[in-house]
Amino acid sequence: MNGKQDVSRSGEKVLGVIGIVFNLLAIALIIFSIFSLGNVENDRNSANSLKNKSCQIRP
């Protein structure tokens, strides 16, 4: 095989691995943000629920 062709093939492999790593990082970040936003919504609902309960007048 030609030496130049080997270099380009190894370059493609390296770029492919780098692309896979970035894709995995992006997927992990998306999953983390989904769970974080879900927890924020739950916290907000819990806080509103507690606030509404504490503001009610008890006879």
Image (tube, rainbow, N blue to C red):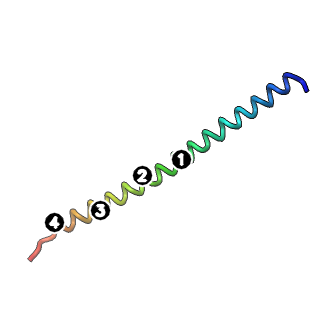
The residue to which callout 4 is attached is 55
Label 3 vs label 4, nearer the camera? 3
Q: Give me the disc on residue 36.
A: 2
Crowding near pointer 4: few (<14 within 10 Å), some, many (20+)? few
Q: Secondary structure at mark 4?
A: helix
The residue to which callout 3 is attached is 46
Q: Secondary structure at mark 1?
A: helix
Up/down of 59 relative to 16, above or below: below
Up/down of 34 relative to 13, above or below: below
Left or right of 55 on screen, residue 18: right
C-alpha separation, residue under disc 1 versus residue under disc 2: 12 Å
Q: Amino acid at mark 4?
A: Cys
Q: Amino acid at mark 3?
A: Ser
Name the quarter where the C terminus is drawn: bottom left
Q: Give me the disc on residue 28.
A: 1
- Residue 12 location, quadrant: top right
Q: Amino acid at mark 2?
A: Ser
Residue appearing at x 66%, y 38% in the figure: 19
